[in-house]
Amino acid sequence: MWTWFYKLASPPYVFGVAAALTPWFFALAALAIGYGTVAGLVFAPPDYQQGDAFRIIYVHAPAAWLSLFAYTTMAVAGGIGLIWRIKMGHAVAAATAPVGASFTLLALVTGSLWGRPMWGTYWAWDPRLTSELILLFLYVGVMSLRPAFEDPARGDRAAALLSIVGVVNVPIIHYSVLWWNSLHQGATVAKIGKPAMPGSMLWPLLSMLLGFMLFYGAVLCIRVRGEVLNRERQATWVREAVKSR
Amino acid sequence: MKVGVWEAFLLVLRRELALSFRRPDQLLQPLVFFLIVTTLFPLGLSVQLSLLRDMAPGVLWVAALLSSLLSLDALFKSDADDGTLEQLALSGQGLNVIVMAKTLAHWLVSGAALVLVSPVVGTALAIPEAAFGTMMLSLSLGTLTLSWLGAIGAGLTVGLKRGNVLLSLIVLPLAMPLLIFGAGATDRAISGASAAGALYLLAALCVLTCTLAPFAATAALRITLE
Amino acid sequence: MSAFWSMGGYARYVWPCFGFAGAVLCWNLWSARGYLAAARSRAVRAMAMDENV
């Protein structure tokens, strides 16, 4: 049952699987994002309070969700590399960092543009915004630490440790709207049973969320292949793999 | 001669303190930096006393953060440079005991010193005396947490070129919640409201860090020393 | 149709958001492919050096 897990520790296997998955991830992502964007911009009715400005949610919420998901993935993958010494863990962690950072930036920028008409300000030092900004700094810290070491393996381990230490921030961001009085609205989708949104608004949002996740998967596959090649340059299987495609 | 854990801890602690006091100029530099930085804000902003009081908690805390960062670089550096750190790691005593002793020594020499000096700075920033107790308590908890966060950062960056810049880049985002609660506690005390909530949160952060950070800092050192 | 473009008056917030989102997605794709291509060419060069040695 666990053989697939063991296989994932093998660089040539990961290289091959990532290559095979990439087009599927992209195709499905394109469909989901395409539907989500069209339905969100055209078919969803304007919000009673926010008018058409609420449509920003269709890029802001998936970006924010992905920023948290990517960081957690980076921390978990780094942890697997650190604890079990599985090099592919470090490859995934290194691959996911820039992607996650870009989505964090997207969440901050779209949030800021949404805040201007809604709250009257481009920025507020509110718990969720502040902790998301801290998340961006944490990404930058991890991405700066890894290349600072002459020995890349040591850099991987140091970056993994740092990302694990920073993962404490992720639940803080998520629960900040619950724990503190915040300008930012509370949970919309996660309320079990009765989400606070009508279906015509909700389905495009879920589709965008799925689409962003699939896109993240596709980009991750490409980057992981790059990481694998960089780390396994000396290995014999690389000759065949690089010659064939 | 087999030394017990507690004896080892005290030995390292005493060594660190002795080494620190042998270089009194290095002890005083972060303190002087703290005093200078807190002076920069009122000079640069040239505000009236009432406005100064409003920004006092933030200024105090940012200055404390920055001056702690200055001394963090040296936490493991000199021992790493001359090979003592490897000897300590191989000594048979748990590396975490040694890390704990070093970090506590660092706090006693920098953070605790900051707390003792803070009434002077507080007066300069027009913080009312009634708020001094909360200010000093929050600074104690905060600098202790910071010493631990800094130990993790120092463990990761010891021996790197431009390590001190990376150290700040790593430690400051982790220290931001600390800054928010610490400044918040002092702020509340100044305005006369109860600072209990913020102080409890600060204490919780401190306890969390003091229990988990030793493992992280030790792991960081092992990564560097391997 | 123009109601669609004006987004109920919020056009200058909504469209830059979607534009920036598209830019981020494109950047991710472009940068990832560049990374893989660079890694591949470095691997090819490393193999060529090995064969010469």
Image: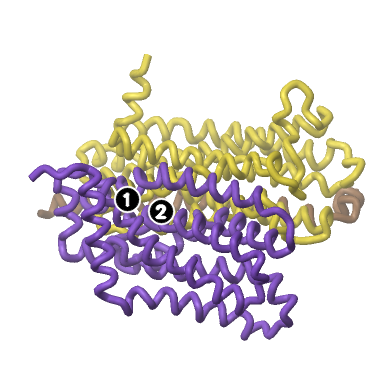
Chain colours: A yellow, B purple, C brown
Q: Residue at x 11, y 42 (%)?
A: B2
Q: Residue at x 44, y 75 (%)?
A: B31
Q: Nearer the viewer, residue A76 or A101?
A: A76
Q: Which residue is mark 2?
A: B148
Q: Earlier in the sequence, mark 1 or mark 2?
A: 1
Secondary-structure class at tag 1? helix
* Chain under disc 1: B
Q: Residue at x 44, y 31 (%)?
A: A20
Secondary-structure class at tag 2? helix
The image shows residue A177, relative to residue B21, as above or below, that is above
Q: Which residue is mark 1?
A: B100
Outermost residue on the top side: it is A1
Percent across and percent down for residue B100 are 32, 50
Q: Nearer the viewer, residue B57 or B120?
A: B120
Give the residue type that dot 1 points to: Met
Give the residue type that dot 2 points to: Trp
